[in-house]
Amino acid sequence: MPLSPQAIVETIRMVEFENLDIRTITLGISLRDCTAPTGKSCGTKVYDKVCQTAERLVAVARELQQEYGIPIINKRVSVTPVAFLADSFSESPLMVALAMDKAAKEVGIDFIGGYSALVAKGVTPGDQRLIESIPQALAATERVCSSVDLASTRAGINMNMVAQMGQVVIDTAQQTAQRDGIGCAKLVVFANMPSDNPFMAGAVHGLEETENVINVGVSGPGVVLEAVRSVGTANFGQLSEAIKRAAYKITRAGEFIGRRAAEKLGVEFGILDLSLAPTPLVGDSVAEILEAMGLARTGAHGTTAALALLNDAVKKGGAMASSYVGGLSGAFIPVSEDAGMIEAVRQGSLNINKLEAMTAVCSVGLDMIALPGDTSSAVISGIIADEIAIGVINNKTTAVRVIPVPGKKPGDWVEFGGLLGGAPIMEVNSQDPTVFIKRGGRIPAPLQGLRN
C-alpha cells in the first residue's frame, strides 16, 4: 500500500502542524508455550521469549520514524493474558510480572500489557491468584500493565469480580501512595475487552491471535480539529464528511507504517486502531474538537451528541481506508491526558456523571480520572458496575481506569507526568452501594446477547 506523492505531502503537513503521530506500535507475543510448574520457571520462559521476539522492535520503530518522518511515540508489547499461565503452577504469578518488567527494560519498550485475566463468567485458581497479586505487581514494576475483563454482552456481569476489583483498585493506590497512586494508571477493568487493542493499559494478545503480530495505534486529534475548523458553520452532514476525510488520511498513513514495521520484523500485520487518543498538549485534544463544533465548553448540554457524531465519522472514515481497522477505534476521553477535558473539569462544566453519559458513545469509558483518596472500595465497585453495564447493554467495549489518590480531596491537583498528564481531583457521589454490590453472583446477559 504505497503512499502517493500527494499523500506524502499531506502527511508531512499533518505531522508538522497538526500533531499527527503513530501513538504506538505494539508487538503481540503469544506465551501459550511458556507454561511451567513454578512461577519462577514460568517467569524465566516469559523473559526469554519477550527478549528474543521483541529485541528489534525499538530499532525498527526508529528506522521507520527516520525514513518517513512520522513520529512513533510508544513502542509496546502485549502478551497472552498471564492468568492462563498461572493455572499451570500453584503460587502467586508475581514472579512473572517481575520477569515481564525486566524484559521490557531489556528491549527498551515503554510498556508491556497482559498481566490480565478474563473472568466474565467465572474464575479459575490462576485467575484468582493473578487478581490478588495485581496491587503488589503494579507497585513492584514500572512498565507492566494489568487488565481484567469481567463482563460481556454474551455472559453478563460478574459482580463478584466487580466487588473484588473495587478493593484491588484501592489496594493498588495504597501500595503506590508515595507516587500518588500511579499504579492505578496501569490498571483497567473492561466489559467486552478486545483482544487486539494496542493501547495501554488494556492491551493483551488474545488467545485467537497468531504467534506474533503488529498492531498499530494512530492518533490524530489535531488533524480532525483542523478539519472541523475548516468547515466553519457547515451543517452536520458536511461536518461528518470533513471528519471522515481526515480519518481516512490518518488511517492510510498509519496502516502503511504498521505494514512496514511488520515486514521488517518478519511478523504478521494485525490491525490499525484509529483512536483519537489525546495528549496534554494544546491542539491535541478531543475536547477541543467538540468545542470547535460549537460547544462553549465540553460538558455542556449537547456534548454527548457531538461526541457521537465524532466517533461515528472517525469509524466510517477509517473503515473506508482499511479492511483491518480494529482494537477500540474512535474517540478516547481520558481526563488527565486531554488539556481540554482538564480545563472543562476546572471550569465546573464537566463532572463524572457527564463523563459516564459520554462513554455510551465513545471508544472506551471512564479513563484516567483522579478521585479523592478516601473513596471507598464499594463506591469504586459501583462506578465499575455502572460503566460496565453501559458496555454490556449496548454491546460495546467500556472500561474503567480511575485513580483514588491517597491524601487528596476534591479540587486538589495531581501530576502524573508524561503522556499521563495531570488532573484535578473530581468529586464523586459517596452514597454507599455496599448492599447492592455484595449481592454477588452474575447479572444475567441482556436479551441482545442471544445472537446465535
Image: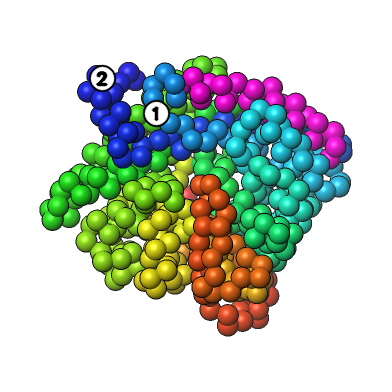
Marks 1 and 2, how far apart in space? 15 Å
- Count of numbered marks: 2
Q: Left or right? Give the position of 353 relative to 220.
A: right
Q: Residues within 10 Å of mark 2 (few under 14, many from 20)?
A: few
The residue lying toward the viewer, choosing from 130 and 235, is 235
Image: magenta residue range: 39-64
- The residue lying at 65 percent from left, 81 percent from top is 435
Query: On the rendered structure, is 26 left or right of 325?
Result: right
- Residue position marked by numbered label 2 in the rendering: 4
Badge 2 amino acid: Ser
Q: Position of residue 189 (x, y in %)?
A: 59, 56
Vertical comparison of 239 with 216: above or below: below
Q: Is residue 344 above or below residue 223?
A: below
Q: Circles 1 and 2: CB distance less than 8 Å?
A: no
Give yes or no for residue 98 being in the magenta stretch. Answer: no
Q: Residue at x 73, y 52 (%)?
A: 139
Q: Residue at x 46, y 31 (%)?
A: 72
Whether residue 364 is visible: no
For the point 51% across and 73% down, which residue is it? 411
Q: Give the quadrant of residue 108.
A: top right
User: Which disc is residue 70 wearing?
Assistant: 1
Magenta stretch containing residue 44, yes or no?
A: yes
Determine whether the residue tagged by mark 1 lies in a helix, strand or loop: loop
Residue 35: x percent and y percent?
78, 34
Q: Residue 257 at x, y = what percent? A: 42, 25
First in residue order: circle 1 vs circle 2: 2
Which residue is nearer to you in this view: 364 or 413? 413
- Farthest bottom residue in view: 431
**Type of secondary structure dominating the magenta stretch:** helix
In the picture, the disc for residue 405 is none
Is label 2 in a helix, a strand or a loop? loop
Q: Is residue 130 above or below residue 303?
A: above
